[in-house]
Image: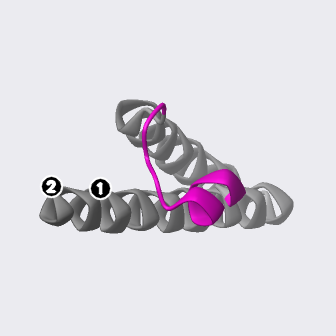
Amino acid sequence: MAKTLRSKDTKGVSLLLFIIFLIANVIALIYAILIGEKPLIIKYMIAIETTLAYIVIYWYYKHKNQKKH
């Protein structure tokens, strides 16, 4: 994420990978809620938030760079 923020470029970044990671973390969060494990719930909530933040950053720079060209 830091490299994307520094370079303001999304080349070499797979959006599909982050979408799959997001889905996996949502499923894991649901499981953690069902079994009542608070540490896992916190872990997966943080993972979801950071993945969503990266998807937003990816989308922002991707569309910003497309407008330039």
Region rendered in magenta? 2-12
In the picture, the disc for residue 62 is 1
The foreground one among 28 and 33 is 28
Q: Is residue 69 above or below residue 6?
A: above
How far from the left and from the top, in percent, is residue 64? Answer: 26, 68
**Dot 2 crowding, Cα within 10 Å, few <14, some 14–19, many 20+:** few
Relative to 22, residue 57 above or below: below
Q: Quadrant of residue 1?
A: bottom right
Q: Secondary structure at mark 1?
A: helix
Instruction: Give the x, y percent position of residue 21.
Output: 51, 38
**Residue 45 x/y as whole percent:** 63, 65
Where does label 2 land, which residue? 69
Q: Residue 49 appears in which quarter of the rendering?
A: bottom right
Q: Is residue 60 left or right of residue 33?
A: left
Mark 1 Cα shell of 10 Å, populated few (<14), some (14-19), many (≥20): some
Instruction: Name the residue: 43% across, 38% down.
Output: 11
Residue 6 placed where, x, y %? 64, 63
* In this picture, residue 14 sits left or right of residue 32: left
Q: Amino acid at mark 1?
A: Lys
In percent of the image, x 52 and y 52: which residue is there?
Answer: 30
